[in-house]
Image: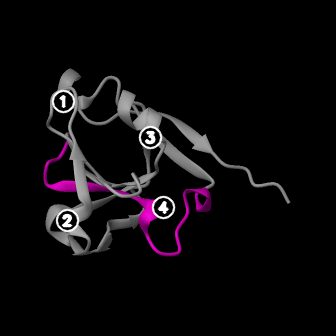
């Protein structure tokens, strides 16, 4: 599967989430507005998964199983894009990634997404 995307704020929106699904998936996601992503190849190989409230839709390749993106529960007009699916980008390019509280999701408790920590990668030489 291939796609083109324009990120809302570049890599400034990079984050991890602590909800049960994201915690197991372990991806670093960045933001893109709903209309700023276009599947260019392999749309027929894209599958999706919804859990809990069913509001967020998580997409993955049905051949290799890689999570590519998801439509956000907190903002249905946005996608979270897996940085590892962007050409030339690795989650290990980020030495510090903000972690948001997905266990206490803003849609459940009211308010904004709450940052609860930072995931760090300290490369050794």
Residue at left 36%, top 33%? 21
What is the C-alpha distance between the residues marked 2 and 3?
22 Å
Q: Which residue is mark 2?
A: 44
Relative to 89, say whether 70 is above or below: above
Lower position in the chain sequence, tag 2 or tag 1 = 2
Lower position in the chain sequence, tag 2 or tag 3 = 3
What is the C-alpha distance between the residues marked 1 and 3?
21 Å
Lower position in the chain sequence, tag 4 or tag 2 = 2
Q: Does residue 79 show up magenta in the picture?
A: yes
Relative to 17, say whether 30 is above or below: below
What is the C-alpha distance between the residues marked 4 and 2?
21 Å
Residue at left 42%, top 31%? 18
Indicate which label's residue lies in the foreground, 2 or 3. Answer: 2
What is the C-alpha distance between the residues marked 1 and 4?
27 Å
Q: Which of the 4 image quarters holds residue 74?
A: top left
Residue at left 35%, top 24%? 103
Q: Quadrant of the C terminus?
A: bottom right
SS class of the residue under badge 4?
helix
Q: Position of residue 65 (x, y in %)?
A: 39, 51
Between 76 and 38, the one lying in front of the other is: 38
Q: Which residue is mark 4?
A: 84
Lower position in the chain sequence, tag 4 or tag 3 = 3
Residue at left 60%, top 62%? 93
Q: Does residue 76 show up magenta in the picture?
A: yes
Q: Which mark is residue 107?
A: 1
- Considering every residue shown, the one lying at the far right of the view is 125
What residue span does the magenta drawing correspond to? 74-94
Indicate which label's residue lies in the foreground, 1 or 4. Answer: 4
Q: Position of residue 9 (x, y in %)?
A: 34, 66
Question: Is 88 positioned to the left or the right of 23 in the image?
Answer: right
Q: Which residue is mark 3?
A: 25
């Amino acid at each position: 599967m291939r796609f083109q995307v324009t990120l809302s704020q570049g890599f400034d929106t990079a984050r991890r989430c602590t909800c049960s699904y994201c915690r197991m998936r372990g991806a670093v996601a960045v933001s893109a507005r709903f209309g700023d992503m276009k599947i260019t190849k392999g749309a027929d190989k894209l599958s999706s998964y919804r859990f809990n409230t069913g509001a967020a839709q998580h997409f993955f390749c049905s051949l290799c199983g890689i999570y590519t993106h998801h439509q956000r529960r907190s903002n249905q007009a946005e996608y979270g894009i897996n940085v590892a699916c962007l050409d030339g980008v690795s989650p290990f390019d980020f030495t510090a990634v903000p972690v948001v509280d997905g266990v206490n999701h803003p849609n459940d408790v009211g308010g904004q997404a709450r940052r609860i920590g930072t995931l760090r990668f300290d490369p050794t030489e």
